Amino acid sequence: MKFTLSWLKDHLETSATLDEILYALTDLGHEVEEVENPEDKLGAFRICRVIEAVQHPNADRLRVCRVATWPNGPEGAMEEVQVVCGAPNARTGLVGVFAPTGTHVPGTGVDLKPGNIRGVDSNGMLCSERELELSDDHNGIIDLPEDAPVGVRFIDYRGVNDPMIYVKITPNRPDGLGVRGLARDLAARGLGTLKALDIPQIEAKFAAPIKVVIADELKAKGCPVFAGRVIRGVKNGPSPDWLAARLKAIGLRPISTLVDITNYFTFGLNRPLHVFDMAKVRGDLRIHPAQGGEELLALDGKTYALHPGMMVISDDQGPESLAGIMGGELSGCSDATTDVFLESAFWDPITIATTGRALRINSDARYRFERGVDPAFTLPGLDLATAMVIDLCGGEPSDLVIDGAVPDTARSYPFDPARVVSLVGMEIAEADQRATLAALGFTLTGDQAAPPSWRPDVQGAADLVEEVARVASLTKLVGKPMTRALPGVPKPILTPLQQREKAARRQIAALGYNECVTYSFIDQTAAALFGGGTDAVRVDNPISSEMTHLRPDLLPGLLRAAARNQARGFMDLALFEVGPVFAGGEPGEQALQATGLLIGAAAPRDPYGSRRPVDVFDAKADAEAVLAALGAPAKVQVSRKVAGWWHPGRSGVIGLGPNVLAAFGEVHPRVLAALDVKGPAVAFTVQVANVPMPKAKTPTKPALAISDLQAVERDFAFVVDMGVEALTLVNAAQGSDKALIESVRVFDQFTGEKAEAQMGAGKKSIAFTVRLQPQDKTLTEKDIEAVSAKIVEKVSKATGGTLRG
């Protein structure tokens, strides 16, 4: 948002200095990005008089001028300076603009130094308008009237001593996109008084020869109100100097009086307007959604193909304007325009933003409408603009033409002065709080405060507190020591699930994995490989085509990261991530996973030949380590009921009955090929929330249960069929005596031709160790034999095998 100091003072009666205003704007939340002060650039240029101009002795096109200057102002002493000048209008008696040596000339970028031109000394410069960046005129030096006050600074005489201020407006403050909105904030801060804005009463001279109609489907949201007025007999042409100078100061190019008036209202009052040339409009104006395929030649000289649903303003010959964004060339005004239709409307911000983004049009009108202008100012803004058109261009107005109604933005929130202390920590008197809100345009009735129509960002009682604190200045906050904590042990801050997430992350990192943080959005192809990719998790407005769906699992992101690392020559990888996965888009359809991925070798190369590729047992061991860190019970079940992205013969699921705690194993080769990963790859996934919580809720760890009685280990070897899994033997042996048997561990498997030669075709031998740990008495040989008999019985019954002799 750009404006000049004089423009601000049109709305704010103030004696504050420029520095005070700049500081207050930033402190109020409108960060000042840049200030262009003409004094810094043109303050050294003063009005002078040429005492004598004679021909240069050594150059036909140069003149040697004796110039009378007043370096300290008209009250100071006159000094005479010799200047060599090549301007054709340099003459004796000319009143011009002089730059002394040492001055930076902005139009040329040169710092003036004493010089010698063709043997004649020259000290300083007589300037043209282009050298002062006032215009492109460089045909001669500035020639001022004879009565121009010599010695005065040229910027003061010309009236261009008006600083330009560039303020960064946050998206939640659309009222700051008008000079008056900023003036209102400064007045509330106490830097002056907001001047009254008198709305004129427009007396209609004739009935408007045109109607406006809003399509029914747009009245509810897209365009609640559209109004306008015909003004006939206008005389268009160049704007008056004050209006043209004001627009040029903020970087806008003056076009014509009618167009410049609309720009003036856009920046001054945050009320974008549009003017149609009535001679070019055929029939009535309709505001309707585009059918798609229509074309509009806009005022920027480009032709735009309209998409279905875009709001347009059309007459009988087709689209005339892109609603709220840019007008059309066909009905644009020119110097020949005599009758106009001045339009003021309120447009839906979302619809304007969507259309502008689709067509890639950036305009001052779009910038304001998509952030939200004041709907209540739609008709008053039209009346003010009508009065200015008549004042500057003449003409007479018609009656008001309108369709729709101004949307009702009335709302109120509880006003509690004590909340300023509780929310912000500032002590502000209630009277001061009420005065602040009233100065900002709020209406206070008892303990209720109603925001003004130009403040769509105020949506609750907390926003009232923010307004009071913002105007009072948050720099006045005083640091205070924290209140002393109550005695005793404080309650834990982290939830149990957060504590588990932290424990899982720490444990996996301790196992040697490198943590990854991948996006929660993945492409549909990858999501479908892991049971996702449905419409329930599709993102309506994805960042890119590769981030269209919420991830159903952490493995897709890790495998993508592995593929990128492999493409760069890193083949041995250990990656992990702890984060959310999504089964749907509703609450409760999100879960926390801890996933690790291993690819390549289990150890680096060494001279002892210990290097081997990772396998399913590496993943199983790491999954069990993570479960142990999360407090999962030691006795769990392992099954082969795995999901489709796991290798069916080299994977498993760890659970407690139907409750799945983790999955582990090799990733299916089909998945690796789809994600361009060179395998094999093993992984584990722990469902963090599925691990049962401990029954005893104590702040300390449970007592260590240890027996001082001697443990006993016995080895068993069974001959079973090749299809029997070792886990079946382990589970059967473990269940023989749950109180006495501490652990069962497989230590040998005998298979192959030699095994079949000894034990029969299709047979193998599995050997395991059973550790017996008594708790109340030392085991006798009879006790050990009894337990051994139970183990042999249970394993034989479960597997159909026999004890190997």
Image (cartoon, rainbow, N blue to C red):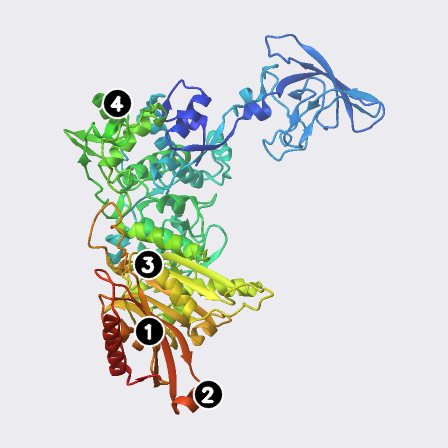
Seen at 27% across and 57% down, the residue is 707
Residue 349, above or below 680: above
Residue 584, above or below 493: below
Report the mark closest to the observer, 2 or 3.
2
Q: CA distance from mark 3 to mark 1?
A: 21 Å
Report the mark closest to the observer, 1 or 4.
1
Q: Amino acid at mark 4?
A: Ile
Q: Quadrant of residue 744?
A: bottom left
Per the image, the residue denoted by label 4 is 428
Relative to the observer, which residue lies in front, 137 or 526?
A: 526
Seen at 44% across and 64% down, the residue is 597
Residue 754 - label? 2
Per the image, the residue denoted by label 3 is 628
Report the mark closest to the observer, 3 or 4.
3
Whether residue 271 is visible, yes or no, is yes
Q: Amino acid at mark 1?
A: Val
CA neighbours of label 1 inside 10 A, class few (<14), some (14 to 19), many (20+): some
Report the mark closest to the observer, 1 or 2.
2
Q: CA distance from mark 2 to mark 3?
A: 39 Å
Relative to the observer, which residue lies in front, 640 or 376?
A: 640
Q: Compare marks 1 and 4 and give the one earlier in the sequence.
A: 4
Residue contact between numbered discs 1 and 4, judged by CB atoms under 8 Å: no
Q: Quadrant of residue 583?
A: bottom left
Residue contact between numbered discs 1 and 2, judged by CB atoms under 8 Å: no
Whether residue 452 is visible, yes or no, is no
Residue 642 - label? 1
Q: CA distance from mark 1 to mark 4?
A: 64 Å
Circle 3: element type: helix
